[in-house]
Amino acid sequence: MKSNPFLRALAGLVLALGAGEALAAIANGALHTTPGDASSNSSGELFLNVWDATAAKSYSLDLGTTVEAFLGDPSAIKSWPLDQRFKDFAAAGNPLVYNIAANNTYGTVSAGAVGAVPSSYGVLASVLNDPTAIAKAESLTGTAGVNVSQLSSVIQARANTLNLSAAAQNGLNPGDISAMTDFQSNLSEVTDMSDPGAGDPYSAYFDTRWGIDLSGQFGFSDAASVRGGADQNLRLYFFGLKGPGINKMQATDLGQGSLVATLDIANATLSFGAGGSGGGGTGQGCEQLSWAGVIADGGTVTAYSTEQSADCAAAAKVLTCDNGSLPDSDVYQYSSCANTYCTLPWDATQKIADGASVTAYQTSLSPNCASVSESRVCSTGKLSGSYTFQTCQAPTACVLPWGGTVAHGQSVTAYRVKVDSDCAENAEVRTCNNGKLSGSAAYPACSAPTPHTDCSLPWGGTLADGQSVTAYSSATNADCAAVAETRACANGVLSGSATYPTCGAPTTKADCGLPWGGTLADGQSVTAYSSATSADCAAVAETRACANGTLSGSYPYAACSTPTGPYIQLSFPNGGDVLTVGKKQTIAWQFGLTGANRNVNVQFSKNGGGKWKSLKTGVKLGRGSVVWKPLKAQATETGLIRVCAPKTKKAAAVCGMSSGPFAVRR
């Protein structure tokens, strides 16, 4: 393919857009979070990524142009010279893949003459100049605006890793943020993955966390290839919000279908200007349109029959180079076409006629909206003024999670926990933005913890706060290490769940004795019941398994049948349950074949039924439950509850009792 003489003329031109603002480190366009980090809290910068998959190398360069400067005049032809590091990188002659990106989500931003872009809050990204990729990029318009934040996060991360790698390669300390943002020139870097010993310490390699589709965020290619067949070029798109308060994405082609980004390896130049998609022919190129440069045989370019029209789409035509001939280039001579209507900045689908006007606002939030309004007039396809918001309203205060409110624009310090030895580490500043409170910390205050408490061990004894012990989930196992865990004490709370202090290899396999008589072979299981009679036998069933002489579970009955006479059945607590001293518990029961109005007495035994003490008397059977808060004196490992309806003239006495011993622990 012949090189473009117009682009060659621009090869030495350093774009002045954003001069004085550009940083040597790539400005990541993020909201300022780190003191001294000048790479954020300002308009993000465009950066170039180039990949040599054959040599396993990648190259990147801070282009030094901010997003806002680019959006200020997106139709201007631009050119960036590439440095000696790129020339050395490209000298191998291998096929290359390249893309361009920038982030601009640092906060309230504005740019004059944004044109079709409704808001400069968003990201700039390249898209392969291919009908399929372009159609998929355009299809993002109208999707949920949360996609903007997803794209922003990926681009921010890429800029940060390139800054670290560039700092290291240019003799600067990559850990010193203030030094990283005080360079005298826009830096480049090359990551070489061909040597396994070199590695990729900053994840700067093109294919590590980047690739040709924004780390998987795009379902299409954002990269073009050169020297791999027909050279390709890129469209530059801005993916932002459709307008203030409209959480929908707007995808805008900044070149309006006629300007593309091209990597000229021979002249070590990246340019953004007129050009078409690369051709695949072998004949003579076409140079009939001076603004398009040389179009390869078989290549295409979009041209217009007029520079102004009420319907520029109808005045456009894709011209194809045919071995030096460019048919219809005498009619379609122009590189661009200006519509005689104006697109509104907050919604590219809304237009006003030439001569009409619309009220716009400098900001969407103001206590005095009239003072930030202006009338924007459409004149020959251009909209006067610069305000970009369709509506304006007074800001709303934010409700605090602990009660009260904070005014718009004001901040409050909140905490993620109420008690911690380092409250400052758990603090965050939450700022109100029109009714939405940033952050997530939910407590208004934080205090140091009380003195630490030791932990009780499940096999007896205590463990000092801050200490740990090895426990086992089984007392016997062929691989004790596999059932071991370290349990640590943290102010009275013991981590983990293993309950045995030791573990030994099992002896010969042993069968298990069944509580109702007989044995169960090792490895076998049987269904047992907590009660011999129940209205719902399935609810009181459990599977008990034999493991080398140890029978799991606790239910003692081999069978269960539906009661034929009056009954009371405990639902809670039953065998194996664990209750806590001082914590309210609900003693619950079911009954049947007897009157609900009968009075019952609720009793407790801490020695497995040897002695009973009354908890509640005269409770109606139909109530079905009572609340009990165990006392310290009632702590036990062999507790039972009994609910009894005394004998009356019309009915015999009937009782229901826990299916087995339960524990009451402090």
Image (cartoon, rainbow, N blue to C red):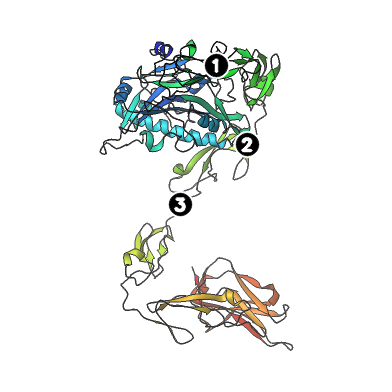
What whole-number distance in Å separates the C-alpha atoms at marks 1 and 2? Answer: 49 Å
Mark 1 / mark 2, whichever is N-terminal: 1
Q: Where residue 345 appears, x then y in whole percent? A: 62, 23
Element at label 2: loop
What whole-number distance in Å separates the C-alpha atoms at marks 3 and 2? Answer: 34 Å
| Viewer-nearest of discs 1 and 3 | 1
The quadrant holding residue 656 is bottom right
Q: Which mark is residue 435?
A: 2
Is 78 displayed left or right of 596 in the figure?
A: left
Mark 3 / mark 2, whichever is N-terminal: 2
Q: Residues within 10 Å of mark 3 (few under 14, many from 20)?
A: few
Marks 3 and 1: in contact by CB < 8 Å? no
Is 534 displayed left or right of 483 in the figure?
A: right
Q: Which mark is residue 303?
A: 1
Q: Residue at x 64, y 21 (%)?
A: 343
Q: Residues within 10 Å of mark 2 (few under 14, many from 20)?
A: some
| Viewer-nearest of discs 1 and 2 | 1
Amino acid under label 1?
Answer: Ala
